[in-house]
Image (cartoon, rainbow, N blue to C red):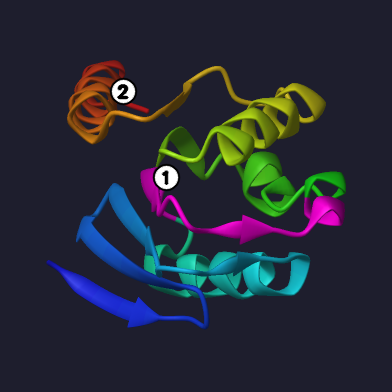
């Protein structure tokens, strides 16, 4: 089932019918347009299938401040497509900005932002197990 596609800033891997992994490239710049490209490719890979997403952001990533003012996930929120999100980053500033972003757009209560990849992988698998049991 594994399929992958590249964008300017990330490689997206469809790991299962309900799991997408997004690996951001070293030195990437998280701009509004680049994040829009990731969202577009994510939608083309996953379609309308409800899924969870694990994102891995490198320590040397940078971001456009205005990017947190855009609800990049609004289309998917309205359709109920994104079920859970785990984000791994070891950059303190990006971790703070992500937490701020998700406080602006508190549409999903299955969100984890951490610096521990093992924890994130375990958490996202647990969320998927629970959702599968619930029939989501």
**Residue span colored magenta:** 49-67
Q: Is residue 97 magenta?
A: no
Q: Residues within 10 Å of mark 1 (few under 14, many from 20)?
A: some
**Residue 69 position in % (x across, y down):** 87, 46
Picture coordinates of residue 9 (x, y %)?
A: 50, 74
The residue lying toward the viewer, choosing from 7 and 41, is 7
**Crowdedness of circle 2 by 10 Å Cα count: few (<14), some, many (20+)?**
some
Q: Which residue is mark 1?
A: 50
- Please name the residue shown 74% across and 74% down the image: 33
Q: Position of residue 81 (x, y in %)?
A: 52, 45
SS at badge 2: helix
Residue corresponding to mark 2:
131
Q: Is residue 46 left or right of residue 124?
A: right
Q: Is residue 57 magenta?
A: yes
**Which residue is drawn at the image coordinates 20% and 29% (left, top)?**
125
Q: Is residue 58 above or below residue 98?
A: below
> Does residue 54 appear left or right of residue 102 in this picture?
left
Query: In the image, is residue 69 above or below residue 15?
Result: above
User: Toward which corner of the image does residue 20 lie, by quadrant?
Assistant: bottom left
Residue 89 position (above or below residue 105): below
87 up-or-down from 58: above or below: above
Which residue is painted at 30% across and 16% down in the image? Answer: 134
Q: Quadrant of the C terminus?
A: top left
Q: Are marks 2 and 1 in contact (CB under 8 Å)?
A: yes
Q: Is residue 112 left or right of residue 19?
A: right
> Does dot 1 land on a helix, a strand or a loop?
loop
Q: Mark 1 or mark 2, which is nearer the start of the sequence? A: 1
């Amino acid at each position: 089932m594994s399929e992958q596609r590249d964008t300017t800033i990330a490689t997206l891997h469809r790991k299962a019918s309900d799991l997408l992994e997004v690996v951001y490239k070293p030195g990437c710049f998280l701009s509004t347009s680049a994040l829009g490209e990731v969202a577009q490719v994510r939608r083309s890979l996953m379609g309308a299938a409800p899924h969870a997403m694990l994102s891995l952001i490198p320590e040397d990533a940078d971001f456009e401040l205005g990017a947190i003012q855009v609800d990049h996930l609004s289309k998917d929120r309205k359709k109920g497509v994104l079920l859970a999100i785990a984000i791994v980053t070891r950059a303190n500033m990006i971790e703070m900005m992500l937490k701020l972003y998700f406080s602006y757009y508190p549409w999903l209560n299955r969100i984890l932002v951490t610096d521990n990849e093992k924890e994130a992988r375990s958490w996202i698998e647990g969320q998927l197990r629970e959702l599968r049991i619930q029939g989501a």
